[in-house]
Image (cartoon, helix red, strand yellow):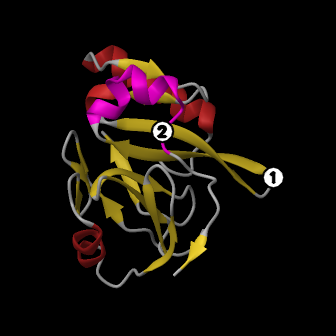
Amino acid sequence: MHGEREHWELLPALGVGPLRFGMSPAEVTDALQGSQPCTWVEGPYAQQNFTDGVKVFYDEGMLTCVAMDAVTGPQVFLADFALAGRDPEQAHQYLLDHAAEHGNCLAYTPDHSLALTDLGLLLRVQQVGEALLSRPLFVIEEWLESEYYCARGHLPLEGAPVTHV
């Protein structure tokens, strides 16, 4: 492991940790104190990659998605369950069980990721060496509930060419 991770709180429909949906890029940079954006990726949604394992996505200049690296990003818990860096099958089952117990709305994205739409939580898988690990993304609720975004695979747009800043 890469040292002690920060622990961030999930704030359903509002954001995660110090980040709130609707923030501007300058507000995000200020909120992440000390972590500097290392790359900016252009595309249908602007993407900033920060040095601490956090990626953020903007739609029309407003924060709409926060993605955590499975190993280096801050840790976020759902109840007492750490979402990042877990065995994907275990994490997937936990979300299914949590949804059944708490009445969360479930959805699957075109890439077979599981989302708890009312919490704005999307769980993806990240390849780390030979291992696959869970990687949480926190998204505005409208993106998870909209056929437009889900059907077109716009959650989130990663893998675009990187522009170094």
Residue 130 in percent (x, y) is at: 81, 52
Could you say which disc has been placed on residue 130 in the image?
1
Q: On screen, 157 above or below 28?
A: above
Residue shown at the point (26%, 59%) measured from the top left: 17
Asked if residue 101 is among those painted magenta in the image, a careful observer would answer: no
Residue 24 in percent (x, y) is at: 24, 65
Residue 129 in percent (x, y) is at: 78, 58
Name the foreground residue: 36 vs 114. 36
Name the kind of residue labelled 1 in the image.
Answer: Glu
Identify the magenta region. 141-156
Screen quadrant of the N terminus: bottom right
Q: Which picture quadrant has residue 29?
A: bottom left
- Which residue is label 2 attached to? 155
Name the foreground residue: 63 vs 113. 63
Of pointers 2 and 1, the one earlier in the residue sequence:
1
Q: CA distance from mark 2 to mark 1?
A: 25 Å
